[in-house]
Amino acid sequence: MRIGCLQFAAQVGDVDNNLDRADEVLSKASQDDLDSLDLMVLPELAFTGYNFKSLQHIFPFLEPTGSGISSLWARTTALKYNCQLAVGYPEKVDVAGQWPASPEYYNSAIIVNNEGETVANYRKHFLYYTDETWALEGRSGFFAQKIPGLGRTALGICMDINPYRFEAPWNAFEFGFHVLKVQANIVIVSMAWLSREEPGLFSQRSDEPDLESLVYWVQRLEPVIEAKKEDEVIVVFCNRAGTEDDAVYSGTSAVIGVRNGEVLVYGMLGRGVEELLVVDTDEQPFSRLIQ
């Protein structure tokens, strides 16, 4: 499978420039790479930015379910490159038909197929404290669905891979066990993952991956690794780069495979790079993270 991760540095609330920034990154990618993609993945809240402080702050940027600017861009781009596409967006649910009802807002991700049709709309299940200022927990649990062209697909958004509210035991591995239970062959994780490094130090090494973050993501998949299954599970970590106020994002988008207890790395980006990572999981990985 040919997979692309579109890593770029969105700015909170600057939707038009964020759209332009994503298009600019794509314009610099190889046309052959773009034309051969099966799947393109974008970060969490890709075009609105992430670091909103309140519901009032994010409210002007909320998008109707599957029909806002993020969904439109996804459909247009999926049709253009004949690929499936996953992108994160802030969802506003139309509850008019359920009156009286309280408003519903979610940190969501949509998947559209190569014909521009919506095949999935997932609402983040485990919220980070930044999400809790405006979003509700997705009530349907973690996502799993058989999607034509992708297979058995699991989809998570950033905090989903952590212990619930950082209160559950480390070894609860809620998302990891979910992946195992649904027998997913591909796992998509759309992210706005923060770095723990100081901004100055981080920017000096922007071309290098943040291996601390990558190793942590892999550790959260321990049940999948320990199952030592022969059938490979492909995992796509698509993170954003850059900074928003005091938030520094760790980039390091990566595509890995888990097979027979090994973690195979097909490709990864630097922590501050704005680029389309393209890998072919039918080719040999360039390294092994765990052996």
Image (cartoon, grey):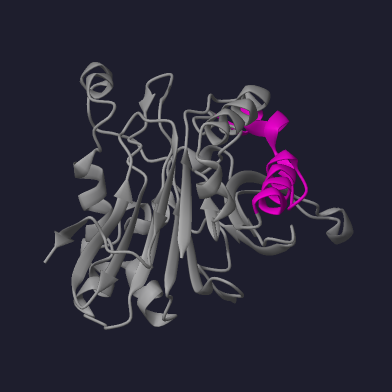
Left or right: 257 in relation to 51: left
**Residue extent of the magenta highlight:** 54-81
Left or right of 8, for residue 214: left
Is residue 109 or residue 126 the one in the foreground?
109
Would you place residue 94 above or below residue 291 in this image?
Answer: above
Q: Main secondary structure of the magenta part?
A: helix
Identify the residue at horizontal 59%, vertical 51% (top origin). 35
Q: Residue at x 67, y 46 (%)?
A: 77
Q: Position of residue 279 (x, y in %)?
A: 39, 54
Residue 219 showing in the rendered view:
yes
Q: Nearer the viewer, residue 129 or 32?
A: 32
In the depicted structure, whether residue 144 falls above or below residue 41: below
Q: Residue at x 30, y 61 (%)?
A: 168
> Residue 258 occupies which quadrant of the picture?
bottom left
Splitting the image into 4 quarters, where does residue 283 fall?
bottom left
Nearer to me, 52 or 97: 52
The residue lying furthest to the left in this view is 291
Question: Relative to residue 60, is residue 3 depicted above or below?
Answer: below
Q: Which of 241 and 193 lies nearest the eye of the viewer? A: 241
Residue found at x 58% / y 72%: 149
| Residue 14 position within the rendered picture, expressed as x and y whole percent measured from the top left | 62, 22
Q: Hey, which quadrant is residue 90 in on the image?
A: top right
